Each structure stands twice: as C-alpha cells, then as structure tokens.
Image (cartoon, rainbow, N blue to C red):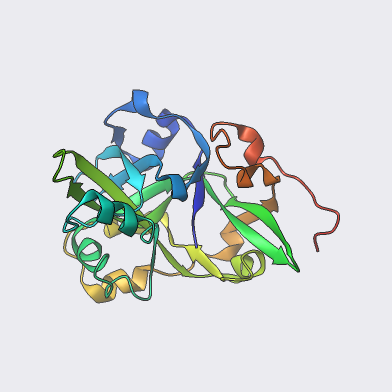
Amino acid sequence: MCYYSSISVGFKIIEDRFGARFVQSEAFKPVYSASAFTFPALPVITSQNPEQILQMNWGLIPFWIKDPESALSIRQQTINARAETVLEKPAFRNATMTKRCLVLADGFFEWHHEGKKAYPFYIRLTDRAPFALAGIWDNWIDPETQKKNQTFSVITTRANVLLEVIHNTKKRMPVILPRDKEKIWLETKLDKSTIQAMLQPYPADKMEAYPVSNLINKAGFNTTNPEVITRQDYPDLN
C-alpha cells in the first residue's frame, strides 16, 4: 500500500527534475510526511497539462459522484488503486484510460511488523532524487457549491524483494515509474495492455530504506518537520 509519502525538496528542484512548472509555486511547501488519510494537496503532473505542476488532493473522487457525503465516503476507499484491478473497478477504470498522472515524491513510508510491534521505514531511491508515482486523477464538481475538486489516487503493485521484507504483511508497494516511462504514462491514447505492462515493481537495487521514529504515527504531527525522516535504530528490530 502507499498511505504516506514525502516531497521534501524545493519547488525549483522539482521543476528542473520533471521539466514542468508549478502553476502556483508560492502555494507549495516541502512536505516530509503527507498522510493520505488527511487528503493532502500534493504536486501532480497530468496527461491534460504535462508542462504544468498542479496541487491536487489525495483520495480520488470520480466525476460521477452525486453528493458531498458520497464523495467523502468514496475517497476514503480510493487512496490507492491496485494495479491488478485498476482497469476493472468502476471508481478507477475511466480515469485509468483517460486521466493518468504523475504523483511527485522523493520518498514514502511503510511499516515492518515483528510480533505485536510495527516499525516505520522510510523508502527512497538510492540517488535520493524525486521520482514519479503512477497515478490517476479526476475532476469532481460539488453540486451544492459548484466548486471543482481535483483529486488523485496512487496505483500500487506487488512488492519487490526489498519491500517484501519491509512491508511484510501486505507485500505491496506504489508503482514507481522509470524516468523513461514517465512521459509515456502521460500519453493520451495508451491501450489497456500498454497501461498494464507499465504497472510493475521498481527494481529493488535502485532503492534504499531505513527505520525512522514513531513521530510518523502521531495524529496531527507537523508534516514540515524533517525529524520524521531521520534514521532511528531499534535494538529489538531484526
């Protein structure tokens, strides 16, 4: 799964890395621990505007949702979309074919379980550069306020050998797109077989992970505090 991520670098680094520009760079602040359960706004590049970086909220609301209550209910279930069923599930299949996006990150968190204890780990690429998660997005218009809501979901796949050890209960990981596949993911006329072929585990030898403190578990923790990604060793962790 992927419920917590970070994008902790400045906006210029993000712009240079992805060859796109923030629509509102002044609205972006580096985030060290974004919890999907709070529906945070994170930087996204869409197939509709591949030269722009937008801020969208995590937790997909499909365009056909009828009312705010249903919108809140469904987005709690659309934080992630499984690669195996993303082309089949009603909440995801239209967006998967027509509204793909890059969700920008430089790390994410997963928990390792030993007995009754869970240890948080921070995972990133070995070069520590920002990367793109395969995502889907949609526009939903609130019928009561006419406000446009742009939201996204992160696609997950089976774990690679590194994440199998760390995320040892679910054995899932987000789909990290190789750099040479990022622009392809944003193409508007991909067929189902091409989309499915891209939703693969990222090579484990290009990733690294280390344990971090339990600050990540605290509700309301300040997401701009870099301590959340500081290494912490646990004597009882194998």
Q: Position of residue 185 (x, y in %)?
A: 29, 59
- Residue 154 found in image quarter: bottom left
Q: In the image, is residue 115 above or below residue 68?
A: below
Q: In the image, is residue 232 above or below residue 174?
A: above
Asked if residue 52 lies left or right of residue 127, the reply is left
Which residue appears at 36% of the width and 40% of the height? 43
| Of 120 and 128, the residue lying toward us | 120
- Residue 227 found in image quarter: top right
Which residue appears at 57% of the width and 45% of the height? 128
Q: Is residue 32 visible?
A: yes
| Of 20 and 223, the residue lying toward us | 223
Asked if residue 105 lies left or right of residue 77, the reply is right
Q: Position of residue 175 (x, y in %)?
A: 43, 62
Q: Position of residue 66 (x, y in %)?
A: 17, 56
- Residue 117 found in image quarter: bottom right
Asked if residue 196 lies left or right of residue 173, the reply is left
Q: Is residue 202 visible?
A: no
Which residue appears at 29% of the width and 27% of the height? 24
Q: Residue furthest top?
A: 26
Which residue appears at 64% of the width and 70% of the height? 168
Q: Position of residue 97 (x, y in %)?
A: 21, 65
The quadrant of the picture occupied by the C terminus is: bottom right
| Of 163 and 110, the residue lying toward us | 110
